[in-house]
Amino acid sequence: MAKNYVEDGNVLTLIAPAGGVQSGVPAVIGDLVVVPLVDA
């Protein structure tokens, strides 16, 4: 859960890239720029 939760939004479940991702740090997955809610 994000620390600055405001309201429900759309959430996508994606497979993390090989190097992993950090919560809150933007990442590019395919053609999408995403902000992960949890570390992976």
Image (cartoon, helix red, strand yellow):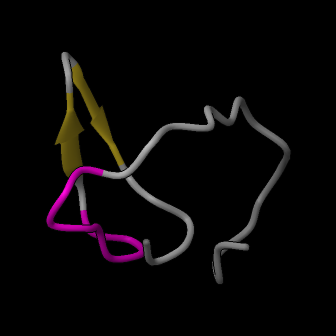
Task: Report whether 6 appears left or right of 19.
Answer: right
Is 14 a magenta residue? Answer: no
Q: Does residue 2 lie above or below 14 as drawn?
A: below
In the image, what residue occupies the spot 74% across and 68% down? 5
Taking the view exactly as shown, the residue that stands out farthest to the right is 8
Q: Quadrant of the N terminus?
A: bottom right
Front-most of residues 17 and 39: 17
What kind of secondary structure does the magenta stretch mostly adopt?
loop
In the image, what residue occupies the spot 38% across and 71% down? 24
Is 20 a magenta residue? Answer: yes
User: Residue 32 appears at what percent x and percent y?
Assistant: 27, 24
Provide the residue span drawn in magenta: 17-25
In the image, what residue occupies the spot 85% across and 44% down? 8
In the image, what residue occupies the spot 14% across and 66% down? 19
Front-most of residues 20 and 24: 20
User: Residue 4 appears at what percent x and percent y?
Assistant: 64, 76
Q: Quadrant of the C terminus?
A: bottom left
